[in-house]
Image (cartoon, helix red, strand yellow):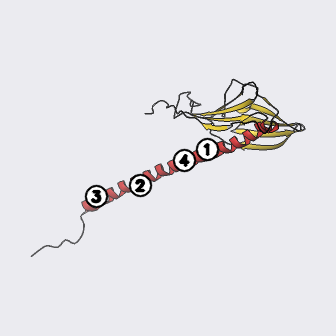
């Protein structure tokens, strides 16, 4: 006569419970990692979109400008700084456009001494921004450089890969002879440097 088994032992049930808990914990941890990567990716996409918008607006302003005033031409400024003037563009009809650091980059259009419009370009505070003018003797172009990942603002140590964007635009292009050929561009950096601890 064969003995039939009527249920599970306490040891078998405990073992199944432990395996289920471990699998559930791994699933929760993996979900957190995937959500974190999704968040980082969406921030990067939004940052790229903001840089593209900044590029279009900055180039249009420089093309219309009669002159560019750069208060600190050889200095780069961190976007973590507050209310630092990057440049001032003199436009026709007594208008001025100011670009300043203010929680990202802030564009102000000024007419008759008062601010008419403000437009913000929220960017990662680790960006450093600088502006310089280059001249070939005939034409002057403005070069806005944004560098990301140069150093951690707290520790000062390099972290992550370094990325550089340059926005190039000829000053007063819209007022010049239409037959003149210009080559403006927005260039992401061709080189990427690795930070400490990266392979």
Whichever of callouts 1 and 2 sits on the residue coming sooner in the sequence is 2
Is 136 in front, or is 104?
Answer: 136
Splitting the image into 4 quarters, where does residue 2 fall?
bottom left
Circle 3 residues within 10 Å: few <14, some 14–19, many ≥20:
few
Assign a secondary structure to mark 4: helix
Q: Which of marks 2 and 4 is in front?
A: 4
Splitting the image into 4 quarters, where does residue 176 fall?
top right
Mark 3 → mark 4, Cα distance in angstroms: 39 Å
Mark 2 → mark 4, Cα distance in angstroms: 21 Å
Assign a secondary structure to mark 2: helix
Whichever of callouts 2 and 4 sits on the residue coming sooner in the sequence is 2
Residue visible at 24% across and 64% down in the picture = 9
Q: Give residue 27's mark.
A: 2
Picture coordinates of residue 86, whole percent (x, y): 73, 31
Q: Give residue 41's mark.
A: 4
Is 38 in front, or is 13?
Answer: 38
Residue for badge 1:
48
Q: Nearer the viewer, mark 2 or mark 3?
A: 2
Residue for badge 3:
15
Is 172 in front, or is 122?
Answer: 172
Answer yes or no: do the residues labelled 2 and 4 have beta carbons within 8 Å? no
Q: Give residue 187's mark.
A: none
Q: Which of marks 3 and 4 is in front?
A: 4
Whichever of callouts 1 and 3 sits on the residue coming sooner in the sequence is 3
């Amino acid at each position: 006569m064969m003995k039939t088994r009527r249920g599970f032992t306490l040891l078998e049930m405990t073992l199944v419970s432990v395996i289920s808990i471990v699998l559930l914990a791994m699933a929760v941890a993996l979900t957190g990692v995937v959500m974190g990567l999704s968040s980082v990716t969406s921030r990067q996409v939004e940052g790229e979109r903001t840089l593209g918008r900044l590029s279009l607006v900055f180039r249009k302003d420089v093309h219309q400008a009669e002159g560019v005033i750069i208060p600190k031409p050889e200095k780069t400024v961190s976007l973590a700084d507050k209310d630092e003037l990057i440049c001032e563009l003199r436009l026709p009809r007594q208008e001025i456009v100011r670009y300043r650091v203010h929680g990202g980059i802030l564009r102000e259009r000024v007419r008759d001494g008062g601010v008419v419009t403000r437009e913000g370009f929220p960017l990662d505070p680790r960006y450093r921004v600088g502006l310089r003018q280059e001249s070939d003797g005939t034409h002057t172009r403005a070069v806005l450089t944004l560098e990301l990942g140069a150093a951690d603002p707290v520790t000062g140590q390099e972290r992550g890969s370094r990325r550089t964007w340059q926005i190039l635009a000829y000053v007063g292009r819209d007022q010049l002879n239409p037959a003149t050929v210009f080559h403006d561009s927005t260039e992401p950096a061709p080189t990427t440097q690795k930070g400490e601890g990266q392979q």
